Amino acid sequence: MEDETQTVTAFEGTQKIASGTPAEVALNVKKRGGADGTILIFEDASGRQVDFDLSGTEADIAARLVPAAQRRPGRPKLGVTAREVTLLPRQWEWLARQPGGASVTLRKLVDAARSATAGRERKRQAQEAADRFMLAMAGDLPHYEEVARALYAGNYQRFTELTEGWPADVRDHARRLSEPAFDWPDGPA
């Protein structure tokens, strides 16, 4: 789930009403009068429920939803954020001897580690996102527990069979979030 553009999806009951950037969805929800809490919004990457402050004008709402990376000092075009790293003296000495210095070496080490575990991490994130969404939206629906077991077992056929009777928008969104969790020889069926 490496997409740099955060997307969210809003549901009113079991009906999907909007999907897109946080600002797009928040403005759509505001227009629908969803500030009373009857509309649930989920981050697509994590499956977590999010709340937006829908007070004020459309410009106020959009300004609050500007990604934090665009508001930080530093080199925002590159997405660079300065943070503290705590290492032992011997580790700092080793980093200082590397070509390009500590920052370049740390970036290379992080990228290598991410590449080595990218498939497993993507699968785990998809499982967690789908499960969080399903718990909130389908926790009381038939076969929820069996669906969750199929998700973590990597059994796509069982997952789709058991979700078939769910409300269409909930079923389709759960399936979309879960796709990276399954091992596909040639992509999804």
Image (spheres, rainbow, N blue to C red):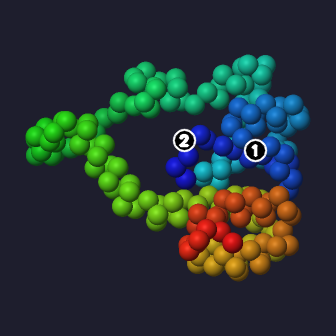
How many residues crowd around disc 1 within 10 Å: few (fewer than 14), some, or many (20 or more)?
some
Label 1, secondary structure: give it.
strand
Q: Give me the residue at 80% from left, 67% from top.
A: 140
Q: CA distance from mark 1 to mark 2?
A: 16 Å
N-term-proximal mark, 1 vs 2: 2
User: Which quadrant is home to the C terminus?
Assistant: bottom right
Task: Tell me which corner region of the image, top left, top right, bottom left or bottom right, holds residue 56.
Answer: top right
Q: Please give the label number shown on residue 4.
A: 2
Residue 140 in view of the camera: yes
Residue 92 in view of the camera: no
Q: Give the total of numbered labels.
A: 2
Image coordinates for residue 88, horizontal then vertical, percent: 16, 45
182 or 165: nearer the viewer: 182
Residue reaching furthest to the right: 32
Image coordinates for residue 171, horizontal then vertical, percent: 79, 64
Q: Amino acid at mark 1?
A: Ser
Q: Is residue 158 above or below residue 27?
A: below
Image coordinates for residue 131, horizontal then vertical, percent: 65, 64
The residue carrying mark 1 is 19
Q: Amino acid at mark 2?
A: Glu
Residue reaching furthest to the front: 186
Label 2, secondary structure: give it.
loop
Q: Is residue 80 left or right of residue 57?
A: left
Q: Give me the residue at 71% from left, 32% from top.
A: 23
Task: Tell me which corner region of the image, top left, top right, bottom left or bottom right, holds residue 103.
Answer: top left
Q: Is residue 4 above or below residue 47?
A: above
Q: Is residue 189 left or right of residue 92?
A: right
Q: Give me the residue at 53% from left, 64% from top.
A: 123
